[in-house]
């Protein structure tokens, strides 16, 4: 039995005892209105007295009450004293409604007793919906004796945030994040510090640029290990009078070009004859042997480019010679070495002697009635030139005036020892502007330089002038011909 029920029962019993106490045997059966619930006073509905029960109400009591009679009155039968020995529950008390009990005396008198409402007897709270950080929950408990249910709101707890911690470190390129998390749910808050990017210091040169090669530079981040490299553009040459003041490179486009040592002086001018660009070298030899002819690869009929020949002969200056010599059956002298005969009289358009320093026709040098062998043996001839024909003789231009223009290579002299004029022209518009020279125009150029004698060497794609390793003229098809068989060279000392 539950405690409440026990208490309720005790109360009922106490009430009965209280009633019984005032109706002890021997007292007059006059129940007080306060203790007894009568039909008229009871507020309890539905409690109707048993019809078979002879209830005695105060009104029913006989009017003459003998109990109050003086002693002097003659005693009759002793007054009846009610004893409510019999109790009966008329209506059970519930949690919320009082019940009714009834005591009955042997005489039939009754008195009704209110049984107080029992009140609910609740069990434990049961959680129906648990509360979360942000949502209310609900609990309930049910009366064990009836179906009455009580509910109670469980209030949202609110987030329980952790101590802030660095969840992502701040770097130059990554945002920094400080996070605090709810210890009860997955709610979190972040404080973001934006990455500021690298902060670079000044560039420092790691490799210096030169006139022709890029350099490199590097700068480092002041806040991390990041480094940036960049190239430093090549400086380009800084020419002064055709020579780079930084690296001494020659400016190919600068004219006049000049070379001079104890044995030779060379001055090369870039001129225009008509519309044709020409490169004309004025040469004065004091060491006559510095000028010579050479076969490609130093072999009769050997082929090479002019650049390769210049390199092979250690030449400061070189032009192409006559590629057709091996096929024209000329006898040839190269630096005093005779190829392809030598018994015949000197019949080439031009001869040179590195002994006398003279250049001209065999007749001009007085060897026209002499075999090449003899001329070479006497040092009157060391080199022969076979392309020809000689068309500038004794200062007279004997060439026909035609319109056969091309790139040209030519050589002449004013007739004094060691004097040579060696020219190469652009032509056939390989440079976009130069039509080239005719044979007659070659002689006109030589005449401008004071020459009295001159011959043409091979032209067209063969025409090449090399000075200090650089090709000065505009090549045909922009390509250097590499099957030339002889060359005119001026050696380095
Ligand atoms: Zn009675
Ligand atoms: Zn209840
Ligand atoms: Zn939370
Ligand atoms: Zn950084
Ligand atoms: Zn330079």
Image (spheres, helix red, strand yellow):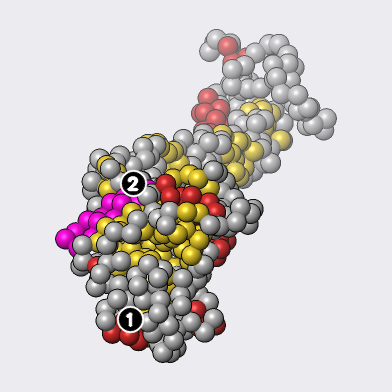
Image coords of residue 81 (percent x, y): 60, 27
Tell me, for residue 172, which label it has, or none: none
Instruction: Kindly state the secondary structure of the residue where label 2 is placed.
Output: loop
Q: Looking at the image, which residue sits at the far left?
A: 262
Determine if the magenta segment contains residue 258: yes
State whether label 2 is within 8 Å of ligand 5.
no
Image coords of residue 427 (percent x, y): 56, 54
Residue drawn 58% across the image and 39% down it? 138
Quadrant position of residue 453: bottom left
Q: Please report whichever mark, 2 or 1, sits nearer to the chain's N-terminal start.
A: 2
* Front one among 36 and 452: 452
Q: Is 371 above or below relative to 200?
A: below
Instruction: Find disc 1 in the rendering and name its residue.
Output: 375
Image check: 441 left or right of 80?
Answer: left
Image check: 11 left or right of 227?
Answer: right
Instruction: Find disc 2 in the rendering and name its residue.
Output: 256
Mark 2 residue crowding within 10 angstroms, few (<14) / some (14–19) / many (20+): some
Classify the position of the C terminus by image quarter: bottom left
Question: In the image, which residues are magenta?
Answer: 257-269
């Amino acid at each position: 039995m539950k405690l409440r029920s026990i208490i309720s029962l005790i109360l009922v019993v106490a009430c009965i005892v209280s009633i019984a106490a005032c109706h002890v045997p021997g007292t007059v059966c006059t129940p007080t209105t306060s203790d007894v619930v009568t039909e008229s006073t009871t507020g309890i509905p539905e409690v109707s007295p048993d019809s078979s029960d002879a209830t005695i109400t105060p009104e029913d009591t006989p009017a003459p009450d003998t109990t109050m009679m003086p002693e002097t009155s003659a005693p009759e039968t002793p007054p009846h004293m009610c004893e409510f020995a019999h109790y009966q529950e008329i209506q059970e008390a519930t949690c919320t409604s009082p019940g009714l009990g009834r005591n009955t005396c042997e005489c039939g008198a009754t008195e009704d007793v209110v049984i107080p409402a029992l009140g609910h007897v609740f069990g434990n709270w049961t959680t129906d919906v648990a509360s979360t950080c942000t949502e209310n929950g609900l609990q309930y408990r049910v009366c064990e004796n009836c179906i009455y249910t009580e509910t109670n709101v469980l209030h949202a707890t609110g987030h329980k945030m952790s101590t802030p911690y660095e969840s992502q470190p701040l770097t130059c390129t990554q945002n920094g994040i400080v996070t605090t998390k709810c210890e009860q749910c997955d709610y979190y808050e972040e404080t973001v510090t934006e990455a500021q990017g690298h902060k670079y210091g000044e560039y420092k040169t790691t490799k210096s640029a030169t006139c022709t090669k890029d350099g490199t530079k590097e700068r480092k981040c002041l806040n991390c290990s990041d480094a940036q490299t960049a190239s430093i553009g090549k400086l380009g040459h800084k020419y002064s009078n055709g020579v780079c003041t930084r690296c001494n490179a020659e400016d190919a486009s600068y004219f006049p070009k000049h070379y001079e040592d104890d044995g030779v002086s060379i001055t090369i001018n870039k001129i225009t004859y008509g519309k044709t660009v020409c490169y004309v070298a004025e040469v004065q030899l004091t060491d006559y042997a510095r000028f010579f002819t050479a076969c490609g690869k130093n072999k009769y009929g050997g082929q090479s480019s002019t650049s390769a020949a210049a390199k092979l002969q250690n030449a400061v200056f070189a032009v192409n010679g006559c590629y057709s010599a091996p096929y024209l059956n000329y006898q040839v002298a190269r630096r005093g070495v005779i190829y392809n005969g030598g018994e015949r009289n000197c019949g080439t358009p031009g001869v040179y002697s590195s002994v006398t320093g003279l250049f001209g026709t065999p007749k001009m040098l007085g060897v026209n009635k002499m075999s090449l062998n003899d001329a070479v043996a006497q040092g009157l001839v060391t080199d022969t030139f076979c392309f020809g024909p000689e068309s500038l003789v004794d200062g007279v231009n004997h060439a026909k005036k035609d319109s056969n223009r091309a790139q040209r290579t030519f050589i002449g002299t004013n007739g004094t020892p060691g004097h040579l004029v060696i020219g190469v022209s652009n032509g056939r518009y390989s440079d976009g502007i130069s039509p080239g020279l005719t044979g007659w125009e070659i002689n006109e150029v030589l005449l401008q330089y004071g020459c009295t004698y001159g011959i043409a060497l091979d032209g067209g794609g063969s025409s090449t002038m090399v000075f200090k390793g650089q090709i000065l003229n505009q090549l045909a098809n922009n390509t250097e011909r590499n099957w030339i068989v002889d060359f005119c060279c001026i050696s380095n000392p």
